[in-house]
Amino acid sequence: MSEPLAVVTGGAGFIGSHMVDLLIDRGFRVHVIDNLVGGRRANLAHHADNPRVRLFETDVRTCMPGDLAFDGAHYVFHFAGIGDIVPSIEKPAEYMSVNVQGTVQALECARAAGVRKFVYAASSSCYGVAETPTREDHPIRPLYPYALSKYMGEEAGFHWCRVYGLPVNSIRIFNAYGTRSRTSGAYGAVIGVFLRQKLAGAPFTVVGDGTQSRDFAYVTDVARAFFLAAETDRVGEVWNVGSNNPQTVNRLVELLGGGPVEYLPKRPGEPDVTWADTGKIERELGWKPEVSFEEGIARIIENIDYWRDAPLWTAETIDAATRTWFKYMR
């Protein structure tokens, strides 16, 4: 019997490349679809000589039903997309094109291939500033175009599930972190910003007073949740994935070794706390986080050179990069 095939869109990216690792460990062949705009070949370098991994360097929006990349696939894990808040405010149409139309193309390719499960990478940003802990039935209130585009992609997936019978599940990711996280030029996730600052001996730029907390989920735990969402018989389900144990930004600074801190104005529309209620995925899929925050940060520090070429953010460059945020967010 030949090894089963899984497709990972965005598989050269942060979470996607860890998904590839997990699938290889579970005996799958993997087709990676990535245009390498946000993804990096280096994230798959350890699979360079592995005949079970094949990279299709293309934009998922150009994929068509019947494409070789999807032929014979058991599962599709759809991570391809663009992130970050400020660029989405500046270029909303691009976010809709990539995150919504890209999802539709992936859904159509999966439908034509007769895949057994399509698992969509959704975002907890769909909840907006939410009551915590946040359950899956919390009201949806996307506050910026990135959040809206990711939620519309999720809705497209469930529409294809209802209308065409494509088996779709969705994972709403809270604050994923870990090795290989993005190092793009856009101002984004706090851990990546801090790692580059640590390497440069620069002050950590803390927004607000640092007591705000985030539900950080380590990337291998996130990938495992996606695999369980594919393996289950359940269809048309959405699950939160987080640690269910929020950590403050001040605690993050402490685990990174401390040092000088420069405090920046708090930004409108940012929650004081993100906190995933993970009861549903624990009950229905038997998933629980395995990597503690302390262990996860230690793993990152061991691989800190990955962020050496990332942008070095200062209070001045952050101010310039976030002016759009302050202009439009309430």
Image (cartoon, rainbow, N blue to C red):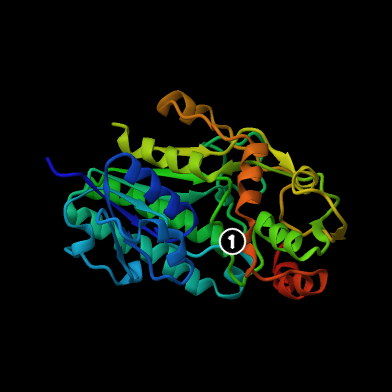
Q: Quadrant of residue 263?
A: bottom right
Q: Amino acid at mark 1?
A: Tyr
For residue 118, side relative to residue 292 (left or right): left
Q: Residue at x 35, y 71 (%)?
A: 59
Nearer-the-camera pick, 123 or 176: 176
Does residue 148 sit above or below 184 in this rendering?
Answer: above
The foreground one among 137 and 125 is: 125
Q: Residue furthest left?
A: 1
Q: Secondary structure at mark 1?
A: helix
Residue 194 appears at what percent x and percent y? 72, 58
- Characterize the local packing of mark 1: few (<14), some (14-19) or many (20 or more) Cα atoms within 10 angstroms: some
Number of marks in picture:
1
Q: Residue at x 33, y 71 (%)?
A: 58
Residue 168 seen in this snapshot: yes
Q: Give the residue displayed 81% in from the left and 74% down from the top.
A: 316
Place of residue 282 in the rendered image (x, y in percent of width and height, measured from the top left): 48, 26
Residue 216, horizontal then vertical, whole percent: 63, 43
Residue sitting at the far front = 49
Q: Is 59 situated left or right of 221 in this image? A: left
Q: Which residue is mark 1?
A: 306
In which quadrant will I find the N terminus? top left
| Res 128 seen here | no
Q: Please state, as top left, top right, bottom left or bottom right, where the C terminus lies in the image.
A: bottom right
Residue 270 position within the rendered picture, expressed as x and y whole percent measured from the top left:
72, 54
Query: Taking 164 as reference, is 70 above or below it?
Result: below
Position above or below: 56 against 257: below
Which corner quadrant of the image does residue 101 belong to? bottom left
